[in-house]
Amino acid sequence: MAWYAYCLTEHPTLANGVRARRPYVIEGIQGVAGAAVMSYPSGEFAVIVSEFDRATTKLEEKSVLEHARVVAMSFRTATVLPFRFGTIFDTEDAIRQAVRSNRRTFCESVARLRGKSEMRIKLVLRDGSQRNNLEEIVLPDTVGREYLAKLREKASRDRERQTKARALSVQVHKLFNPLEEEVSCKKVNADGMLLDIAHLIDTKSIEKYQNRYNTAAKQLKNCQIVVTGPWPPYHFLPEKLRTVAGNS
């Protein structure tokens, strides 16, 4: 029997003051395909898993939500390092080996993310004055002077968008004052630009962070802003952890 892995957490201490040595079922939650969710201890960590039969179980679109739900519920009580969707270990030994080989990264990441939460901001700029800058430049099929002119115009528009996005992200950073941030920007239509921003904050400051929404909504002119969270720290994991995929 293989094991589907959701996330890694610190190994909890049980009510009697000791740590479990064998996997145990976590009550009140179902995993992928309705499977029971278990905590698999490995040293100072526990890998949150469920049994997975490769021959009879297929990962579907709803499996993404089931995976995310387990991670979110684990995050309510512990620091979590989410595994990539579809991470499957074929044996118990493969789980232990993954923990051993990434132990240093896991230790550093758990220490850095303990007591932290991720908040997300979706900021849509809709500004008629920026319409020309947001319109897509279509490059001609032919080469020559016209192609080079359009190429230069396209590069100029891209720089203008990036400059606008950087200015907005700096403004948002000053308003919300996160510990860390990750920003992506894309054009959503002819007169709109979307900034998708992830902020890492102290969990104790969530209410204060949320209260800054009204101030941000007033100061960020011509913008539609949505704040969600708290979430597990999906955007603030080390690259090495993001590649852990068992034998999937």
Image: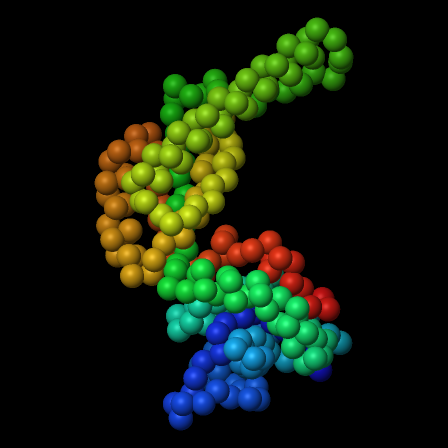
Question: In which quadrant of the rendered image does the C terminus lie?
Answer: bottom right
Is 196 placed above or below 26 here? above
> Foreground: 92 or 107?
107
Above-or-below relation of 36 to 175 = below
The residue lying at 50 percent from left, 52 percent from top is: 235
Where is residue 140 shown, x and y percent of the image?
Answer: 70, 16
| Residue 207 drawn at (x, y percent) | 26, 56
Residue furthest out toward the bottom? 16
Camera-side residue of 140 and 72: 72
Depth order, front residue of 198/18: 18
Work out which residue is located at the far top of the displayed protein and give it.
145
Q: Is residue 62 above or below residue 222?
A: below
On screen, residue 214 versus residue 242, left or right, reads left
Residue in view at x 50 percent, y 36 percent: 185
Q: Is residue 57 visible?
A: no
Instruction: Identify the colour scheme used.
Output: rainbow
* Along the viewing direction, whichever of 43 and 174 lies nearer the viewer: 43
* Whether residue 55 is situated above or below residue 234 in the rendered picture: below
Q: Residue at x 48, y 18 (%)?
A: 132
Question: Residue 67's image quarter?
Answer: bottom right
How many badges with numbers are in the image? 0
Q: Is residue 207 visible?
A: yes
Give the image location of residue 184, x and y in percent: 50, 40
The image quarter containing residue 122 is top left
Left or right of 117 on screen, residue 41: right
Q: Quadrant of the N terminus?
A: bottom right
Which residue appears at 35% of the width and 40% of the height?
Answer: 173
